[in-house]
Image (tube, helix red, strand yellow):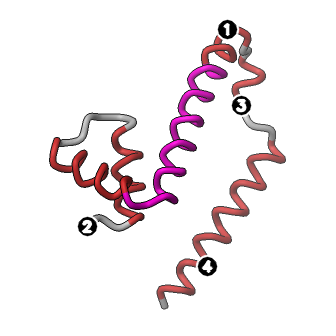
Amino acid sequence: MLSCKEVCHFVSESLDQQLPWYTRLRVRLHLFICKACRRMVKQMALLQTAAWFYGATDEQTSTEENDTLSENARSRILKQLQQANSGSADHNA
């Protein structure tokens, strides 16, 4: 039986490519018994649909100015990544 973590990985992977039939079967069996994973699949499908819909709309109205992050956003993201990396380094030690 697949773990929830494995199912999440396979469902995410299935958005980009078709999985082998035996993997799809194993995922479906897990989804049959796991309510949390069924909910996760619905949420991923909703996010994919929203990204597709709003991405198509944004492409029509986007400008170069809107396609880049502000310096403030860049620094916040960089700070969070550095904190995450230092936290995982501490955890692995």
**Residue type pointed to by label 4:** Gly
Identify the amino acid type marked 1. Answer: Gln
Prevalent SS, magenta region: helix
| Residue at (54% x, 32% y) in the render | 48
Secondary structure beneath dot 3 equals loop
Between tags 3 and 1, which lies in front? 1
| In front of the other: 91 or 46 | 46
Which residue of the protein is positioned furthest toward the right in this rendering?
72
Say which residue label 1 marks: 60
Say which residue appears at 76% left-offset and 24% top-offset. 66
Spatial CA span between label 2 and label 1? 45 Å
Residue 43 image position (x, y, % from top left): 57, 44
Front label number (4 vs 3): 4
Label 2, on which residue? 1
Residue pointed to by mark 4 = 87
Task: Mark 4 or mark 1: name the one nearer the start of the chain.
Answer: 1
Q: Which residues are magenta?
A: 33-55
With 83 as the anchor, is 52 left or right in this view?
left
Between 57 and 59, the one lying in front of the other is 57
Residue for badge 3: 68
Report if residue 41 lies within the magenta region: yes
Report x, y in % for residue 53.
61, 20
